[in-house]
Each structure stands twice: as C-alpha cells, then as structure tokens.
Amino acid sequence: MGICISVASSEIHGIPQVHDENVMIFEANKVRHETKRLCSVYSKQGTKGLNQDAASLYQDYGIEDGAFCGVYDGHGRNGHIVSKIVNNSLPSLILSQKNAIEENDTTKNGVNNKQNKFSNNFLKWKEAILGAFGVMDDKVKQQENLDCSCSGTTAVVVIRQGNGLVIANLGDSRAILGTIHDDKLKAIQLTTDLKPGLPCEAKRIRSCNGCVYALKEEPHVQRVWLPNENYPGLAMSRAFGDFILKDHGVIAIPDIWYHPLTSNDQFIVLASDGVWDVLSNEEVASIVWMVESEEEAARAVVEAATAAWAKKYPSSRVDDCTVVCLFLQKKPQNLGYIESGKLG
C-alpha cells in the first residue's frame, strides 16, 4: 500500500503508511530492500491550544527515488485548518503543474549538454512551484465558511530529484542539511527565515504601505501591521492566507533555489519555528546524527525541543513542534563533532 507516482501522473495516489491528524508519510508501492525506513515525521502539540502544524513526506515523488518533504506552521484562529489544507493539496499541485509544463514544453535546446538539461529542468520545477503556490493561496481564499483574513500558514518544501534538491520557502519554518566535511558533521542552513525584520522584506512591506515594528514588550520580534492600526501583528513576511495583509506586502511567493548533493550529504531536516526558537542548527543535526534509528530521528528532535522550551522559557507557552527527517543514505558510525555552516 502507499504511493504510486510517475512523471506522467498528474495526481498523487495511495494510502499513507503513517497518517494522523497532522502528519503523513507516503511510501512507494515497490518492495524496498531497506530493512528500515530512512525517514521520519513527528509533530507534537504545544501548550497554546490546537496543534496548528502539519507535515508530510512522499517517497518516489516525480521520479523513482525522488522525495517531497513539507512542513507547514499555521497561525491565527483558523491556522490549523489552513496548514492541513496546504499539507493535503500542495504536493499534488506542484506535481500537476510540473507535468503540465512537461507536456506543453516545445522548447528546442540549441546544445544538448548536461548543463542545459539541468538548467531547463530546474526552471521547470521553479515555474511549477510558483504556479502551485499561487493556486494554493487562491484555493485557501476560496474556502467556504473559512475566514483566513488573519489566519494562514508557513510552508517549507524540499524536493529531491536525482542528485539535487529543489527548495521552496514561505515564512519562518526552516530546512537544514547534514553533511560530512573533514570527517565531521556540518549543519548547513538551506533556507532563510523570512521575517519582517529582514531589510529586503521590510522594504517590500513598507513600499506597499504596510507597517513593520516591534512592540515594547517584545522588542526582538518585528511584526507586520496594517497602516494606522494595531493589528494583526504578523511575525512573518510571507505566508499562505493572511489576506488582510496581501495588499500590504505579505506575499505567497516563495524563495526557490537549487542545491546540488554530494556523496558526503547525509540527511535533510525540516522543522517549524517551534524547534528553531530553542535549538540551533548544530544541535538539531547532532540529535539526528546520534539517534540509533532513522525512524526515531524526528521524534528525538521534537522531544529535545520540548525539553529546551521548559528550560529556556519556563514561564512561556510552548510552541507546536514538527519535524521531517529524510536520510539520503544509511549513516556511517562513529564520526566526530558538529561544525556550523550556512549557504552564502
């Protein structure tokens, strides 16, 4: 049971092997030789109310041995609904857009070399993702009896295709890559947390007559406000939903780029900001690296984040924490310490 995906298919079919209200893992129909699943997904409700996070992982996405990973962090009164709508729809929307582009592609390459093939394929994925995110935002807006004027969700997506990753990010969830460098594990941040405090994000918002500032009681948190109003105070600069701010610079257009993989790359971790608020990239990578079973990696990170919340912010409400871990290969044993790193 599970997923059956091909490049020619426009939809994702199958029954998830792991499925609860918030997380899904879809596995390929083929019989795999691995004795253990080299991935894990886990979500834990915080103490603020309903769990507004959602996540999914699809194996054999687009091509054999391809994969789709997504984490969505909802916010606002109906954020839990928005994150689940996006979680259920975005993977198939992206694949459908990609397939339509493939079918309509009549471009003739002047030189048939590997670089042209790579560039053309990435451009197709980028176009598909941009189209799918636009359709997804419209779909959220068109939901009957669902007020998303001040509710929405982040989205961080990593798509593995062959020897590379296509990454799309909307909001302040994050993805990192664990790789081996000089016989040590290095944590590389794959995404930028898209918050209102970033100069380029603040510039766009203010150019659309939106306001960006922090409250006196939380001077470290920049938020987005309507002009001449004291709401809604959104703590991210891009999101699905939040339609009251869409005319004031909050957009549903993701950052998209490509990251090539090497034989040294070990695993990918995606997580909602409830994890990154209390754990560093290096701490998360270390936890994933030290866990005995790949299937337990996501849960181990979430439990560590929950413990860190209690220690660092004992008087604060704990945020929801959600993690997706995808191992790119079976991990070797007894390698050294963590080094920090970030893409330039």
Image: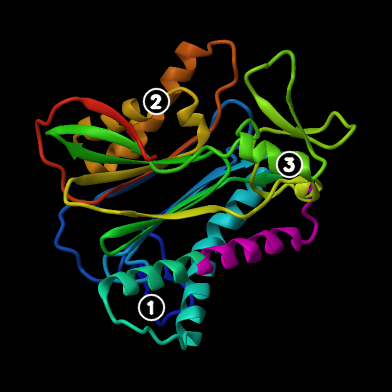
Q: Residue at x 41, y 24 (%)?
A: 279
Which percent across, then down, holds residue 274? 51, 30
In this rendered view, identify the residue nearer to me: 73 or 263.
263
Residue furthest out toward the front: 110
Q: Disc 1 and disc 3: Cα gap in Å?
A: 38 Å
| Disc number for residue 280 | 2
The residue carrying mark 3 is 205
Residue 131 place in picture, x, y as percent: 59, 67
In this view, the residue farthest toward the right is 228
Quarter where residue 235 is shown = top right
Q: Spatial distance from mark 2 to mark 3, Cα to Cα?
A: 28 Å
- Say whether disc 1 or disc 2 marks the residue closer to the N-terminus: 1
Q: Can residue 249 be seen in this view?
A: yes
Identify residue type, mark 2.
Ser
Magenta region includes residue 40: no
Amino acid type at mark 3: Ile
Mark 1: amino acid: Val
Q: On the image, numbered disc 1 is attached to which residue?
A: 7
